[in-house]
């Protein structure tokens, strides 16, 4: 199980020393974790995730270029058409990178799917904390199947992300896809036992990574490195204490 630590702002370099699989940088100005600084280097083996909320595609590409973003996380109301346009442009960039690496013999445009591009796409879907009062409609995923690499499920709040609350993970027993997904929303050390139970259930089969943020902070954007270290070790050990 992979680990994503999101909301990097004040001490990303310190968190990077723990070698999580993903580090998330929020590029949405209203967020208290809005990232404007320099990314720590090097981040070998760690994927840099740029988090966007209904951003113009040109802005997304500016961040990819300036910060070397490996994965784009779409946390707003981005349509499947938006994702398709973004994916198409990412394929073009991947092709250009390929030309420079392989020389003039490989000039053809990639013919197949998302796996040919260098930058991945995560599309976020928010689930109400009271899933019985507001049952999530998994049919909305269908049009996104071919235009993103991962789904991410977090807890629905008034604003995108950062509620500090978990949703009822049993909702995912109705997950209709085989696409790998990130599990997010209010996950902290207190959820270790619940996570262990979740991992033993069929709905966890396509869970690719656990995404943590606010429950591992001293203040918004300042991560508690020792708590993350403890959680990472538990995750690596199958959440056995």
Image (cartoon, grey):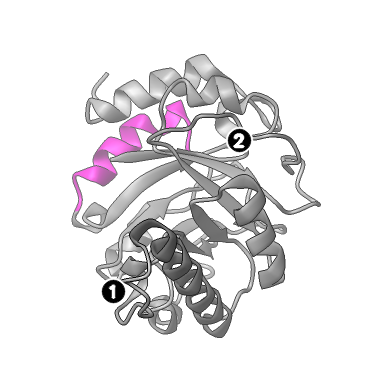
The magenta segment is 187-201
- The residue depicted at 42 percent of the width and 70 percent of the height is 95
**Magenta stretch holds residue 78:** no
Q: Is residue 119 left or right of residue 173?
A: right
Q: Which residue is mark 2?
A: 214
Q: Is residue 227 above or below residue 212?
A: above
- The residue depicted at 79 percent of the width and 51 percent of the height is 29
Q: Quadrant of the N terminus?
A: top left
Q: Nearer the viewer, residue 98 or 41?
A: 98
Q: Nearer the viewer, residue 141 or 24?
A: 24
Q: Is residue 205 left or right of residue 90?
A: left
Label annotation for residue 176 = 1
Q: Is residue 44 left or right of residue 14?
A: left
Q: Secondary structure at mark 1?
A: loop
> Dot 2, how many residues are within 10 Å of its Cα: few (below 14), some (14-19), or many (20+)?
many
Magenta segment main secondary structure: helix
Q: Secondary structure at mark 2?
A: helix
The quarter of the displayed image where residue 203 is located: bottom left
Circle 2/circle 1 CB separation < 8 Å: no
Q: Nearer the viewer, residue 208 or 106?
A: 106
Q: x%, y% of residue 34?
A: 74, 44
Q: x%, y% of residue 116?
A: 34, 68
- The residue depicted at 69 percent of the width and 59 percent of the height is 62
């Amino acid at each position: 199980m992979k680990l994503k630590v999101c909301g990097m702002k004040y001490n990303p370099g310190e968190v990077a020393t723990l070698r999580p699989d993903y580090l998330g940088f929020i590029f949405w100005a209203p967020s208290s974790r809005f990232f404007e600084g320099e990314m720590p280097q090097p981040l070998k083996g760690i994927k840099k995730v740029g988090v966007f909320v209904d951003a113009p595609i040109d802005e997304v590409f500016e961040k990819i270029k300036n910060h070397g973003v490996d994965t784009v996380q779409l946390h707003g109301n981005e349509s499947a058409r938006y994702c398709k346009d973004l994916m198409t442009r990412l394929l073009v960039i991947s092709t250009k990178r390929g030309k420079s690496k392989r020389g003039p013999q490989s000039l053809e445009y990639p013919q197949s799917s998302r796996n040919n591009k260098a930058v991945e796409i995560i599309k976020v879907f928010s689930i109400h904390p009271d899933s019985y009062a507001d049952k999530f409609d998994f049919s909305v995923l269908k049009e996104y199947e071919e235009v993103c690499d991962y789904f991410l499920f977090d807890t629905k709040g008034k604003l995108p992300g950062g509620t500090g609350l978990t949703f009822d993970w049993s909702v995912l027993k109705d997950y209709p896809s085989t696409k790998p997904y990130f599990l997010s929303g209010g996950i902290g050390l207190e959820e270790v036992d619940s996570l262990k139970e979740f991992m033993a259930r069929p709905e966890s089969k396509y869970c690719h990574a656990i995404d943590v943020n606010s429950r591992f902070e001293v203040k918004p954007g300042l991560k508690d490195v020792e708590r993350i270290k403890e959680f990472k070790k538990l995750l690596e050990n199958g959440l056995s204490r």
